[in-house]
Image (cartoon, rainbow, N blue to C red):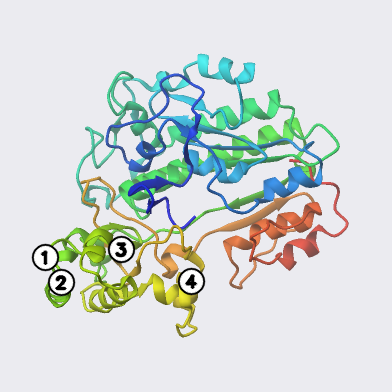
Amino acid sequence: MVANVWLDRRTGKLAFNVGDKRYRILSAGAGTDKKPEIDPTQALDGDGSSPAAILVSTFSDELAIHYGGRSKIFGISLKNRGAIPLAGHAGKAFWFSNKTGEFVSSTFYYERYPAWVNEWNDKKLALQYSGKSWELLKDKSTYLFGAAADKLQGPDFAGYGRKFPHPYGKADGKYYTTLLTTSPVGDELTLDFAKTLIEREQLGRHDVPDYLAISFSSTDYIGHFFGPSSLEMEDNLLRLDRTLADLFAYVDRYVGLENVLIVLAADHGSPEAPGYLNEFGIKARYLKPENWDTEPAIASLKKRFGIGRELISKYEHPYVYLNYGVIRDRGLNQSDVERAVATELMKLDGIALAISSTALRENTLPSTPLIETVLRNYNPERSGDIFVVFEPHSFLDEAEGLPALVHHGSPWRYDTYVPIVFAGGSLTARRIYREIQTVDVAPTLAAIVGVKPPSGARGVPLVEVLQSQIGSTTVNP
């Protein structure tokens, strides 16, 4: 998975990482959403989704294989790309449809929904917020970012506003469900669905481990929209604490936390919004890749190669895609053009590194932490022609005019600094001060449960967690 989307060279169209038209969405009317959204990739999944693009096994797959399919495995998220990789190939995935306000799945997982899913969707819980707003949980003066709330810059979106209260609008509004997911409501709906699933699927009630992976995705949307150091994010995290406490209390009553291993983690970090950084004297800005083809360095290169049309076909973060037609028509060598464009891109303001796919494929590059990070993202079938690393605190300014203030996807520390917490069972409280990787989580879970690590895993089990698990009771969900 090199990115959320990549250019399929066979079709010339963008491929969404979990989009799969062979497996339609089970709920009527819950397929493609053509309207512009906070998350535009939601409009790329066609009318179907599956884990087919995942080329290796996942922890959930190995759990299913080891226990002969007896483990119950589920992934839940507001996003299909949040639920599907967690559920893997062998589990079941559910995600929220902005078109219907329901949790949905595809025919990859079910021929028809279990009765409890239809019952939950029939309650239409998303409609109860019609005409309401996201209000602050506490008095504004008690918040760290309360005094700075009115400084937040950026475009408004569908009347949602840039300061509290944030109105959701009426339930029949064009962006009603989108705004729900860009608030703590998205996580509250996810929690209610998860609690219903635990009870109705009888998780943790038999003699093999079960696995429930929940992606509380509102934090991601709120972070993009408002930035991490905002009153909105602060209020969201206060509410997320309550949501998690509610979940753990429910699991304790239903299964007993002594029988449960909890892992809390994130898939990425977040940069600060440029405006916020500028207040502290830190240079931060947005870059516009759509202008690169007209930059003097690239224009000079086009003249050198005798190219009168666009040389850069598309930038899909973090890759530049070249215009293959013009390269072919001019009889140019693809590798030579890639290297030349990478060299010229490096001269542009805001670009720290540009590496051609040819160089990545041949792996003749010096061994540095930054280049090793880039190499781990490379896939010859999916990666673009040139991998671009922006300078620290330089960010993508998306051409669609989306209201997001920040975008992640760099190798810099702010994008890779995430929490990883293990709790429950016999674990004792301690804090570890050493660098670990998010990819260490799956091998650690595999070691605890006693199954093989995922087939493509490069992480290592976290010894501190394993040492605390010695002598513990069997872990259930």
Q: CA distance from mark 1 to mark 3?
A: 19 Å
The reply to whether the C-beta atoms of the residues labelled 2 and 1 are less than 8 Å apart is: yes
At numbered mark 1, what does the secondary structure look like: helix, strand or loop?
A: loop
Query: Which residue is identified by label 3?
Result: 320
Indicate whether 441 appears above or below 39. Answer: below
Q: Quadrant of the C terminus?
A: top right
Where residue 329 appears, x then y in whole percent?
22, 63
Label 1 neighbourhood size at 10 Å, few (<14), some (14-19), many (20+)? few
Q: CA distance from mark 4 to mark 3?
A: 16 Å
Does label 4 or label 3 sit earlier along the sequence? Answer: 3
Where residue 32 appears, x then y in whole percent?
37, 30
Indicate whether 300 appears above or below 165. Answer: below
| Residue in front for this viewpoint, 19 or 476 | 19
Q: CA distance from mark 4 to mark 1?
A: 32 Å
Where residue 136 appears, x then y in whole percent?
37, 37
Query: Which residue is identified by label 1?
Result: 308
| Residue in front for this viewpoint, 141 or 234 | 234
Query: Which residue is identified by label 4?
Result: 375
